[in-house]
């Protein structure tokens, strides 16, 4: 059983470590989630994660609260600051499928720019994943990871009744 930890700070804005921007255009919206290993470790303070100095292999971090009645279509990973660990890969998914959106994304290279692939990734074969109840987008760390920063860009469709209100 892997450890699970939600990194969903209440603060949202250009200086926070999650959900730094969201743009709505009708029912389609994109969310950019800034993920910093150092910020996650600092926010946890050794209380939930196995270590206060690294995210240990198989730890699952909730990084974005997916609202109910949402389809998450794709997730793109863009490495900002590469991890200096010898090996550092992540899977992106949810509680039902740890790597439903992407698997084994290498975060040791600044040039990494991975995206959910139609026909390859589990949720890519179905056009995304529908969430009938609130959930989280999770990052599963496959290796002990001490540092690194990356953005997740999440393409979503809002299917709630509020999306149809005038």
Image (cartoon, helix red, strand yellow):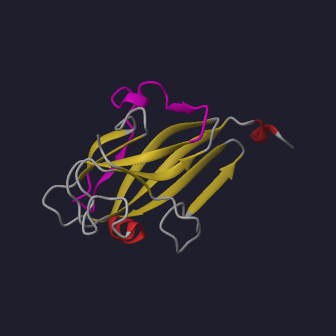
Comparing 141 with 51, the one in front is 51
What residue is rendered at 69% in x and 41% in y? 27
Q: Going 53% across and 38% down the picture, which residue do you hit?
A: 72
Range of the magenta residues? 106-134
Q: Which residue lies at the image location 20% right of the left edge and 57% below the top edge?
A: 144
Q: Is residue 39 magenta?
A: no
Q: Looking at the image, which residue sits at the far bottom?
A: 15
In the displayed structure, would residue 28 be above or below residue 79? above
Tell me: 159 left or right of 121: right
Q: Pick out the residue farthest to the left.
A: 86
Residue farthest right in this picture: 166
Q: Position of residue 127 (x, y in %)?
A: 49, 28
Q: How many marks do you count on the picture?
A: 0
Task: Identify which residue is drawn at 43% across, 30% down.
Answer: 123
Quadrant of the image for the N terminus? top left
Q: In this rendering, would 3 be left or right of 35?
A: left
Q: Quadrant of residue 19?
A: bottom right
Name the quadrant of the C terminus. Answer: top right
Expressed as whole percent of the image width and height from the top left, the position of residue 94 reads: 43, 39
As displayed, is residue 86 above or below residue 136? below
Q: Is residue 18 above or below residue 62?
A: below
**Residue 90: percent from the left, percent from the top?**
29, 49
Percent position (x, y) of residue 162?
78, 41
6 over 97 or under it: above or below? below
Main SS category, magenta section: loop
């Amino acid at each position: 059983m892997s450890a699970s930890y939600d990194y969903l700070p209440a603060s949202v804005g250009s200086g926070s470590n999650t959900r730094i921007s969201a743009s709505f255009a009708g029912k389609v919206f994109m969310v950019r989630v800034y993920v910093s290993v150092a910020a996650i470790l600092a926010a946890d303070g050794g209380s939930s994660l196995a270590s206060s100095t690294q995210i240990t292999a198989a730890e699952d971090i909730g990084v974005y609260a997916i609202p109910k009645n949402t389809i998450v279509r794709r997730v793109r990973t863009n490495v900002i600051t590469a991890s200096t660990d010898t090996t550092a890969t992540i899977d992106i998914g949810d509680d039902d499928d740890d790597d439903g959106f992407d698997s084994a994304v290498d975060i040791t290279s600044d040039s990494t720019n991975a995206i959910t692939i139609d026909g390859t990734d589990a949720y890519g074969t179905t056009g995304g994943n529908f969430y009938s109840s609130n959930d989280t987008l999770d990052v599963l760390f496959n290796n002990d990871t001490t540092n690194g920063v990356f953005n997740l860009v999440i393409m979503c469709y809002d299917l709630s009744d509020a999306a149809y209100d005038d």
